[in-house]
Image (tube, rainbow, N blue to C red):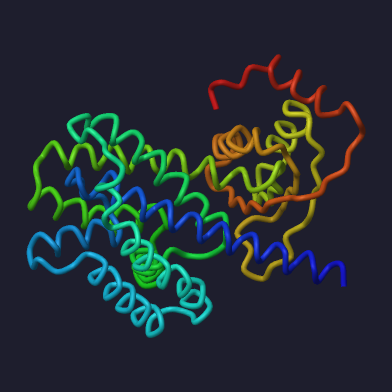
Amino acid sequence: MLTLNKILLERLYRTLELIFAIFLYALTFNLLLRPSGIVIGGMAGISMILNYLLSINIPLIIFGLSLIFIMLGYLLLERKIVIQTILAAILYPLFIFITYNISNYIIINYREIEVISIFAGIMLGISTGLVQRSGFLSGGTDILEKIIIKYLKISAGLAFIIAEGIVLFFGLIYFKLDQFMYAVLIVYIMNLISSQVMLSISQKKMFYIYTDEIEEIKNFIHNKMGYDVTFMLNKSQKKHHHYILMSVVNTADYYLLRNGVEELDPDAKIIIFDSYEHFERPGKNQERVKRIKEANYEHF
């Protein structure tokens, strides 16, 4: 019963997190982006372009696009992915409609475009990171990116560049060059912030590292970083690597370990999970931090 209540509370928390994130995104769009004429990617950017060309109400455009992308997802993707987008697809146009005239009540000097771009990037980054952390999808171009990944067999990063880049390109055609430059700045800040928000989901990360450079990586993790390592044989029938290393590290050392493994073995496959509970000898973490600082791994 306790476990069930914990699961329900966790789902409620994730749902509330998604609702707040979608509201923050809609607020940022109507308060900062739309009055400034800055076209970023996603449905927000598409709606601004279509509004400019066809003079159609933006909340109506976003609602229509949400339905179109859900239908595309239903036809081309797994049903689980579509279910993850339904709540956001309902909330996003609703919050866009509710906050549509917010700039009439909150007065901002839109000539300070640099400040607006920085704050827009931060707010959108928080929003995007919270959506990713909640386990839901925001709908819209998220579905398009999933379709591109599935059928073009490319990485998520490249799919993001394609989907968002197309919108930014049309924004460059129909709007000013300086607005395009600020849009690129906003997207850059947004990605930086969202990755930090997403990583804060837990204090520790569990790494599964598929590699044949077992001694080098094990030495790096255990002797240089101070973390315990579990060694396993890869018994998969389609194995490309013979060995698996498992280690739980502090979230603060996420990039240090990931980049270190990539440098030691560029062909390694890394799978990373959130770790919510991990017990070790008191004081060991302080020893580890001292060891990492003394080693000075800035080149990673």
Q: Residue at x 72, y 53 (%)?
A: 243
Compared to residue 294, the image places residue 229 above or below, namely below
Q: How many numbered marks have been drawn onto this rendered protein structure?
A: 0
Residue ID at (31%, 64%): 97
Camera-nearest residue between 102 and 72: 102
Task: Return the residue nearer the eye: 279 or 39.
Answer: 39
**Image spot of residue 108 (x, y percent):** 26, 36
Horizontal placement of 265 versus 69: left or right?
right
Residue 167 in the image, given as x and y percentages of width and height: 21, 56
Q: How far from the left and from the top, in percent, is residue 131? A: 50, 57
Query: Residue lying farthest bottom?
Result: 75
- Taking the spot 36% from the left edge, 40% from the top edge, the residue there is 121
Q: Which of 148 and 222 is in front in this view?
A: 148
In the depicted structure, whether residue 217 falls above or below residue 271? above
Query: Where residue 194 sits: x, y (%)?
Result: 47, 45
Relative side of 37 to 158, left or right: left
